[in-house]
């Protein structure tokens, strides 16, 4: 993500000179350091970054979502993965070496440092933007080779970044019970009962979406993510919220947090400046009893994690907030359904409009994405997009993380497949949907591969599985039809989706990568998005957001209960792209039942909104297939 | 596994008194220890144990395959998993507390020790039978609570075990090229090239099956596993083999290892007593250059692992021998096929015999298993069983690791399902097959669930998947049909199978447990064994051993190539148990093609061996289903 950038390299000679000077400047460090690591993240390990946190992009020019830069006295190298090899090579000048992760010959950051550093070197990093476990691994590897890793408190990129944007402090939005289903006080009580259950005295919240969820507040500090910069420390009788204090001047926010009239002492929120979290956590830790434990995410920053003495520190892969947030309550589910209905209305309009406009040859990837945004923005409680639209024609569709730029912008036509992966934030919910369409006559091969992808999509969506099943066990269902024909796709099948929160959230997902995903539960919401990509020709992806719901199969083994998915996304899947001979009767039934729901639910809303052309399009596109 | 035991508890009062005395005896330890851990394993982390290594069974009476005993001054506790709760509670007297692993309320060994030990306690364990990583975790947890873990060199169980059997030293069998496909010298050269590739100077082999495979030798030191007690240390110019030197008196063994006339210096095998591995490894490590590295499995014993200084130690989850052994060469594949043909001949005979005998009411679980063994033993190059036969009738079939004992022995009848999971060691290969049969009229429910299991078996066996796919990604295919009806089974779907080696081997498998399995490759051999178990009524399992082979689907995505499975097991699947209405046409075709292969291949061999009745049975049982 990050900001737009033309695909010409950034000139970094002068910046590197300045950074190397800073690496020797006793204003920042007691002794010169021989290397400086610039990680990708912010202090909250956010997936998307505010402009002030795009330090790696600033120093090397590469603005992809993943990458780590390391600068030594003589070298500058940047590690990124296969999605970004081309982009990084275009955005970085020849002062930089691109380190292609995943290739056998590519050294790890540790091994590279060891290979280029003089003996007994010191490597610096900002402890606020490196996670505690990454620090530990790097520190260990360097120590094994006689070097040392040190925390540099002043960020050296910030020191040389003259026009660095300030940290955003956007207006906070308070969410009432009608949107959240639970007051923040209810959530606090639930959190504390989890803490009591595990004998935990304090919990440190560092992930921005968890803090936003806990307090029923939203912001817009980071593009696409409705979050705000903050930390929280919760004890059994104490709540401390760290954020830009100016934000609390707004009466609705003061009232929402009951800052002036707390109902009960243990629900009284003490607010403090964002930066003071460090000293406040130190104070909390100084007063800990011998057996008291503090919960913190294992993805939290090294700086904050190390404040907590080891004997008192309990690292957790998923915090209780992350787990609670993932299981949507009835109000949130209702909101997500409403958001998806509005989103489907906008997309039906878009596709009806595209059908008319494409033959004129005037619609491009960018203008189609803009039109989609315009149509969504007409819907109630629209806030913004949930991620940059992937609007791609023909060969651009095969670039999985494609984002149209003026120099790559293709015109939509009757001859090429169009793939649109887009979504929005509404106050009642977050959407993410991909449809792949052909506005002329698709080839037999395009239809064949589309149909395999559809079979995979259905296999996941219609799967019935026992309570307690982890999402990664469903991933192969999405690939089975492709595999049978020797095909595959090189990404996961689904991710958790927030409710008016981040479009990517943990702890569940559907992926062949066996990261530690948590078992699926009724109320969780994930995407189901298999694809197929033919390099240089086209890309296909069919994505619905789906809700985990109880299933009632014939039997109930050991009273465990079963689960399945209910699609929240209700946008027709283009029948023209389907080779129905390749579908089983069950699959045809699924498509027809899905389209019946689209027609019924979205048709009613289109009718209510008086959007006649889109309604006609919807009715035509949802005719039963044979 | 272990030895048979009646289901009455072992009286352990006196033994525990003696062990507690030993825990204070300065003959074994400088200072008294407050707790002693008795792990399950031997010094090679073998799955099955020689009688002299059944120390946990000796001290507590429980003889299941998994369990750890811990004795303190006042308490004695034994941890095991759900498979063994009943058995352990029957085999242990009330001096012991059964710790049921997997239940929420059950403390871990560490937490239990911390809860019962006086302050500053010392906990002892034999470093030879605890793996290095287990030692590390236990040691850390105890240290965190002010206790310490110490290595007790003399095993305290051995000290009180008066009639402890001696370590077996069976006659070694040398395998020629006709069985192995590669000389041990070839294997040594391949190992060294892997070592050179990763800049490794020495490799320490500790797993018994890896050593047997490397040297093309077999033994019978452990029941069911054709292995022998040994270690090996391999350098670029040195081969050291540690074993009972008396075994080398046999001329064929001396010649096989070229002990008297080595062809080249670097292929000269230096032999030394089994026990001397420790001092020899110390000597090797004392002479290491500053950058030299030693490879050892992360499952090796703590004692041996800690001989290697940390800076020189490279722990690996799967050794190059484990990986090379898993991919069978053409000769091994041919041998495995031959072994499975012979095994199928014996089973066809068995089932034809059962059909005749069961109505007489004289066949029991034990006598059926004995008959199967007798019939197998008539086949060429039969060595023994590959595991204790699971011969189970009706409700006993629902006990997944059932082994018939006189007091549980049921009679086969026309009214109950019979499940037989059995296999053998032949010099050319190892077998493992499960068939579930009804000799009367199965109920609709029995047929329905059998058919779901069959659908799962076929889904895995017929799956096509990309090269590089890990086995755990196929596990859900085996469950899909069961899940759809709300059913499941609580075990993995498949394990690696050795070639005249252990019937369970790494590094590949098919399981929902995402242990670090290695990608499937052509030449690997695994089992495919979904099941369904109805507690108190019946058990169903359909197991074939299958070979990973290249597949040739329509397309070839990114030239990655595809794989599928070829069944090596060729024993009819009882058509009477199948509800053909629940099968797709593809599945019916699979069954008919499988039965055609059984008829053709096993029919020819039955004919050659003149086993007429079994041939008639085979022909009848392999008629196409409609």
Image: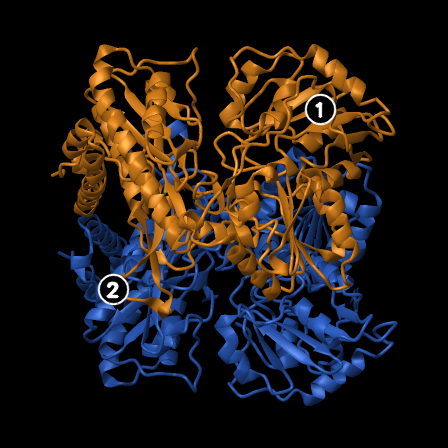
Chain colours: A orange, B blue
Place of residue B337 in the rendered image (x, y in percent of width and height, measured from the top left): 38, 52
Q: Is residue B89 above or below residue B508?
A: below
Q: Is residue B565 above or below residue A436?
A: below
Going 16% across and 58% down the picture, which residue do you hit? B581
Instruction: Please tell me the numbered disc located at residue B549.
Output: none
Q: Quadrant of residue A65?
A: top right
Q: Residues within 10 Å of mark 1 (few under 14, many from 20)?
A: some
Circle 1 sits on which residue?
A158
Going 34% across and 36% down the picture, which residue do you hit? A543
Is residue B161 rendered to the left or right of residue A433?
Answer: right
Of the numbered discs 2 and 1, the one sitting upstream in the chain is: 1
Is residue B535 rendered to the left or right of residue A186?
Answer: left
Q: Measure the C-alpha gap from mark 2 to mark 1.
A: 62 Å
Going 67% across and 68% down the picture, which residue do you hit? B111
Is residue A242 rendered to the left or right of residue A566?
Answer: right
Circle 2 sits on which residue?
A554
Place of residue B260 in the rendered image (x, y in percent of width and height, measured from the top left): 70, 49
The chain ID associated with circle 1 is A
């Amino acid at each position: 993500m990050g900001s737009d950038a033309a695909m010409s390299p950034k000139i970094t000679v002068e910046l590197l000179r300045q950074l190397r000077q800073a690496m020797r400047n006793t204003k920042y460090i007691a002794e010169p350091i021989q290397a400086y690591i610039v990680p990708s993240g912010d202090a909250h390990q956010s997936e998307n970054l505010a402009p002030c946190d795009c330090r790696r992009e600033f120093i090397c020019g590469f603005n992809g979502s993943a990458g780590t830069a390391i600068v030594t006295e003589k070298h500058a190298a940047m590690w990124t993965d296969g999605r970004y090899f081309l982009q990084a090579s275009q955005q970085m000048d020849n002062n930089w070496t691109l380190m292609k992760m995943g290739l056998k010959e590519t050294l790890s950051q540790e091994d590279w440092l060891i290979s280029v550093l003089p003996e007994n070197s010191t490597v610096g990093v900002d402890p606020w933007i490196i996670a505690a476990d990454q620090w530990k691994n790097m520190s260990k590897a360097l120590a094994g080779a006689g070097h040392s890793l040190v925390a540099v408190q002043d960020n050296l990129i910030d020191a040389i970044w003259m026009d660095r944007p300030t940290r955003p402090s956007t207006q906070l939005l308070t969410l009432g019970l009608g949107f959240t289903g639970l007051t923040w006080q209810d959530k606090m009580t639930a959190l504390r009962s989890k803490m009591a259950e595990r004998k935990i005295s304090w919990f440190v919240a560092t992930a921005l979406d968890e803090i936003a969820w806990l307090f029923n507040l939203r912001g817009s500090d980071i593009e696409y993510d409705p979050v705000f910069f903050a930390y929280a420390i919760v004890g059994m009788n104490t709540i401390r919220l760290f954020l830009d204090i100016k934000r609390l001047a707004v009466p609705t926010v003061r009232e929402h947090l009951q800052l002036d009239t707390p109902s009960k002492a243990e629900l009284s929120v003490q607010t403090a400046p964002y930066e003071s979290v460090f000293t406040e956590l130190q104070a909390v830790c100084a007063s800990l009893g011998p057996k008291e434990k503090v919960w913190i995410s294992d993805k939290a920053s090294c700086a904050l994690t190390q404040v907590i003495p080891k004997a008192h520190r309990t690292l957790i892969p998923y915090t209780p907030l992350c787990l609670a947030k993932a299981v949507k309550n009835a109000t949130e589910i209702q909101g997500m359904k409403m958001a998806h209905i509005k989103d489907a209305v906008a997309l039906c309009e878009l596709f009806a409009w595209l059908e008319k406009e494409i033959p004129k040859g005037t619609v491009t990837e960018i203008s189609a994405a803009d039109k989609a945004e315009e149509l969504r923005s007409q819907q109630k409680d629209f806030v913004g997009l949930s991620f940059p639209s992937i609007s791609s024609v023909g060969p651009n569709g095969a670039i999985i993380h494609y984002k149209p730029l003026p120099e790559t912008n293709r015109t939509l036509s009757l001859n090429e497949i169009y793939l649109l992966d887009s979504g929005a934030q509404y106050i009642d919910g977050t959407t993410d949907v991909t449809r792949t369409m052909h506005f002329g006559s698709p080839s037999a091969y395009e239809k064949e591969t589309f149909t395999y992808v559809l079979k995979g999509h259905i296999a996941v969506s219609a799967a019935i599985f026992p309570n307690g099943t982890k999402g990664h066990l469903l991933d192969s269902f999405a690939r089975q039809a492709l595999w049978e024909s020797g095909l595959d796709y090189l990404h996961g099948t689904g991710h958790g989706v927030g409710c008016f929160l981040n479009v990517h959230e943990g702890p569940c997902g559907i992926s062949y990568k066996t990261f530690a995903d948590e078992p699926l539960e009724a109320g969780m919401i994930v995407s189901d998005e298999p694809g197929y990509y033919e390099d240089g020709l086209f890309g296909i992806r069919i994505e619905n957001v789906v809700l985990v719901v109880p299933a009632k199969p014939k039997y109930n083994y050991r009273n465990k209960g079963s689960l399945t998915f209910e699609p929240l996304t209700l946008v027709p899947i283009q029948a023209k792209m389907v080779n129905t001979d390749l579908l089983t009767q069950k699959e045809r039934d699924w498509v027809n039942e899905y389209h019946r729901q689209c027609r019924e639910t979205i048709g009613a809303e289109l009718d209510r909104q008086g959007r006649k052309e889109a309604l006609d399009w919807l009715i035509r596109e949802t005719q039963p297939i044979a």
